[in-house]
Amino acid sequence: MATRLLFYLDGYDSAPWRDAFLALDPDLDFYSWPNWPAPDPNSPGFALVWQPPHGLLAERADLCAVFSLGAGMDHLLSDPQLPALPLIRMADDGLADGMAEYVLMAVLMLHRRMPHFIAQQKRREFVRAFAPAASDITVSLLGFGRLGQAAARLLAPVGYTLRAWSRTQKTGGEVAHFHGPDGLDACLQGSDIAVGLLPDTPETRHLMTEPRLRLLNPGGGLVNAGRGSLVDAKPLLAVLDSAHLSGAVLDVFEKEPLPADHTFWSHPGVIVTPHVASITRPASAAAYVMGAIQALRTGNTVPHQFEARRGY
Ligand code: NDP
Ligand code: OXD
């Protein structure tokens, strides 16, 4: 029987997605919202979705599993009617590569004092200020999953000293590892740049308090490309305004789109990007999803399945 895939991605052309899936399986029944067929218990299928309207998935009694088009699951977990089905995170290589590029760019911007020079340019000031060597900069990756590890692979050759913080203990590589609630402060203490690559869970919300931000070395900075809930605006603005931190590169926000009157837009120390650090690409995502469907069908484990007990 042909595999049935129900696709939901509002506001974007679904044709590249259809093409990518059909290139892998010409027999696939690919339905893009709003042209989903009526639920058919005799033809169980899979959903691949990004920010579906609440209640949409609950209407489908014919789903075997739901794939997220992104690595984050918060867009699904916020649905009070989310059906009790296996939920699979996106874990294609394109997503990890894109995030690694973004983190490298953001760390270089903070290390090479770009917020300062952009502000100077606006004032037409030609005042020289030099950055330390990369080897004198310690970067702490908060979250060392697929994206954190991909970022480390691009940061390491530049010469940065790397640390990583995760929930479970890790060892090895050219990275100093920290883990668990007790490991966070030790990881941040004496670091120059912290990079948020954490999922949104009850444990990660507002983790970067003002005292924690102040554990970073004076003149340091914050990159946040995981979820906006990691840091509340108030403590971040306090450490920037007191010049303890020199800059922040932020891709994710507690409220998206970032409201037009938010201080981040005009703060000279803050660089805002509109949740574009990385994007799931059709070809690599289709390969990942088709492989995972095959694993589910044959009773094998899918490595990036959401686990409610840990929240990601
Ligand atoms: P993974 O699940 O592979 O990695 C998550 C990492 O966070 C793991 O290292 C995990 O620890 C760690 N972690 C989770 N909870 C805690 C905790 N309470 N304390 C310490 N560490 C914790 O996810 P990805 O790397 O694929 O993605 C990370 C997040 O990035 C996504 O959830 C999403 O929100 C965001 N994202 C943002 C994008 C953007 O464009 N801005 C694009 C894609 C993703 P452990 O290793 O022990 O499991
Ligand atoms: C994701 C995202 O979760 O784009 O993949 O934020």
Image: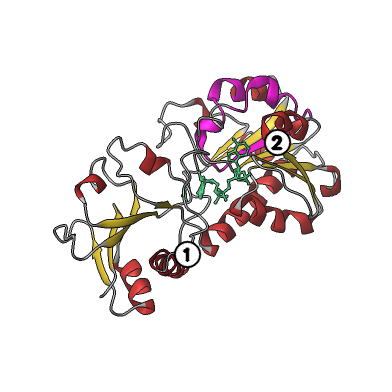
177 horizontally vs 15: left or right: right
Whether 294 is drawn above or below 211: the answer is below
Residue for point 34% across, 56% down: 65
Q: Nearer the viewer, mark 1 or mark 2?
A: 1
218 horizontally vs 49: left or right: right
| Dot 1 alpha-carbon crowd within 10 angstroms: few under 14, some 14 to 19, many 20 or more | few
129 horizontally vs 101: left or right: right
Number of numbered markers:
2
Q: Is residue 8 magenta?
A: no
Three-letter amino acid code of the residue under disc 1: Asn
Q: Report if residue 63 is visible in the image.
A: yes
| Dot 2 alpha-carbon crowd within 10 angstroms: few under 14, some 14 to 19, many 20 or more | few
Residue for point 31% across, 38% down: 79
In the picture of the structure, the residue carrying the numbered disc 2 is 125
The foreground one among 253 and 182 is 182
Where in the figure is residue 2, as x and y percent of width and height?
A: 26, 74
Within 8 Å of ligand 1, the CB of disc 1? no
In the picture of the structure, the residue carrying the numbered disc 1 is 300
Within 8 Å of ligand 1, the CB of disc 2? no
Quarter of the image for the N terminus: give it.
bottom left
Q: Estimate the spatial distance between the alpha carbons at disc 1 and disc 2, rounded to whole Å.
A: 61 Å
Residue for point 46% across, 48% down: 306
Where in the figure is residue 45, as x and y percent of width and height?
A: 27, 62
Q: Is residue 219 magenta?
A: yes
Three-letter amino acid code of the residue under disc 2: Glu
| Residues rendered magenta in the picture | 207-236
The foreground one among 115 and 177 is 177
